[in-house]
Amino acid sequence: MSQKDKMLVGAWYSCLDDELEAMRQRARNAVHKHNTMPPDARGAMAPQLAELFGHVGRDCLIEAPFHCSYGINLMLGDLSYLNAGCVILDSAPVRIGSGTMLGPAVQIYCAQHAKDPVERAKGMEIALPVTLGDNVWIGGGAILMPGVTIGENAIVGAGSVVTRDVAPGHTVVGNPARTR
């Protein structure tokens, strides 16, 4: 099984792999194109970026600058909005529901690196999916850790670090984020 296959099925894999590096380079090129195009020419997002993603719903908007590691695992629902400076490290599926808004500088992480320093030096990591339901609002500067699910209509306060699932309709704030 290739390192890419291991990553895609949620098994431990080494990110220090030529095939994965080529995928990350493709994403960097698409992201660069998006981030450097004039807004009027870009529209909602550069075509290269939209083609890279796993799914793009209708009328989505991604402000520049933006960064993702692979893009292939990123799925955007209709009318989703990502403000400037968002970073999505999508080594696992990242689903962003319809009508969901991410504030500026939101970070979504999927990779969990090996705790053993020898294994970590080999690039060993496991990718855990992150899911945001419909009509979620993520405040600026929030960080979503690997494996979390944010239920529909939930709110994550600005600057919060989300380490656990958030129930639908709940508001969480702080580090670590807790129900308010």
Image (cartoon, rainbow, N blue to C red):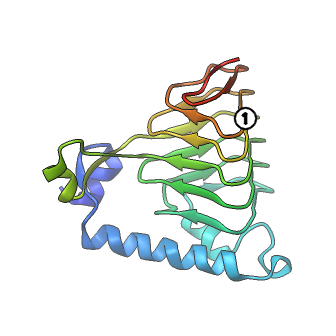
User: Considering only vertical position in the picture, is 168 above or below 98?
Assistant: above
Q: Is residue 104 left or right of residue 176?
A: right
Q: Is residue 17 left or right of residue 170?
A: left
Q: Residue furthest right?
A: 40
Q: Is residue 101 left or right of residue 28?
A: right
Residue beneath the point at 43% across and 48% down: 92
Q: Callout 1, which amino acid?
A: Val
Q: Nearer the viewer, residue 180 or 125?
A: 180
User: Considering only vertical position in the picture, is 142 above or below 41?
Assistant: above
Q: Position of residue 11 (x, y in %)?
A: 26, 43
Q: Nearer the viewer, residue 87 or 160?
A: 160
Q: Residue furthest left?
A: 118
Q: Position of residue 65 (x, y in %)?
A: 68, 68
The residue at which mark 1 appears reads as: 136
Residue beneath the point at 75% across and 64% down: 63
Would you call the spot at circle 1 few (<14 residues within 10 Å), some (14-19), or many (20 or more)? many
Q: Quadrant of the N terminus?
A: bottom left
Q: Position of residue 85 (x, y in %)?
A: 67, 61
Q: Quadrant of the C terminus?
A: top right
Q: Position of residue 136 (x, y in %)?
A: 73, 34
Residue beneath the point at 56% across and 37% down: 131
Which image quadrant for residue 3?
Answer: bottom left
Q: Nearer the viewer, residue 46 or 116?
A: 116
